[in-house]
């Protein structure tokens, strides 16, 4: 390698180093202005706004489907009280007492079946 080649390589190296240092300082200044956590939070909020706008557009476009879905969910969550009301209207009130089951109490006490077991200690 000749002396002029070495000088040219050094000049290119110094130019590349200057570009690198400039970009590094720009990144540092940018990170100082807004940290990584703030950037993530900002990105999440912006993406959330976009998703909310798209959901609102879809809901406005398909209003009937959204209404039927909301009614279906409401009916599902309130199915117990709704069915109890229908039973009351029809006349099938459930008093909580089952007359169909006749049973006699057991003639034994649970203590009659207790067997004490002692295991030898080894």
Image (spheres, grey):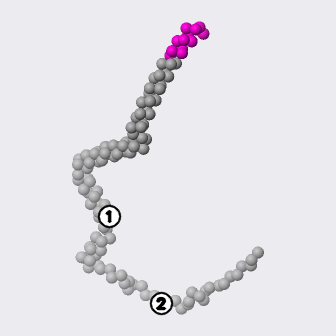
Going 72% across and 79% down the picture, which residue do you hit?
119
Side of 51 where 89 appears, left or right: left
Q: Secondary structure at mark 1?
A: helix
Going 52% across and 18% down the picture, which residue do you hit?
13
x and y, in percent, of residue 86 in the image: 26, 73
**Magenta span: chief secondary structure:** helix
Q: Residue 96 versus residue 118: which sits nearer the camera? A: 118
Residue 42, by quadrant, is top left
Q: Residue 5 versus residue 68: which sits nearer the camera? A: 5
Residue 19, by quadrant, is top left
- Magenta highlight range: 1-12
Q: Secondary structure at mark 2?
A: loop
Q: Residue 88 versus residue 6: which sits nearer the camera? A: 6
2 and 1 marks in contact (CB < 8 Å): no
The residue where tag 2 is placed is: 104
x and y, in percent, of residue 113 in the image: 61, 86
Side of 25 where 114 appears, left or right: right
Q: Is residue 3 magenta?
A: yes
Q: Which mark is residue 76?
A: 1
Task: Tell which residue pokes out farthest to the bottom in this image.
Answer: 107
Q: CA distance from mark 2 to mark 1?
A: 39 Å
């Amino acid at each position: 390698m000749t002396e002029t080649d070495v000088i040219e390589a050094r000049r290119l190296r110094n130019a590349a180093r200057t570009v690198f240092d400039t970009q590094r300082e720009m990144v540092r200044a940018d990170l100082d202005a807004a940290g990584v956590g703030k950037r993530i939070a900002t990105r999440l909020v912006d993406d959330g706004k976009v998703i909310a706008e798209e959901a609102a557009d879809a809901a406005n476009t398909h209003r009937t489907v959204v209404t039927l879905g909301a009614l279906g969910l409401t009916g599902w969550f309130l199915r117990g009280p709704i069915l109890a009301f229908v039973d009351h209207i029809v006349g099938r009130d459930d008093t909580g007492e089952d007359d169909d089951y006749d049973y006699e109490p057991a003639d034994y006490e649970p203590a009659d079946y207790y067997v004490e077991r002692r295991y030898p200690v080894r």
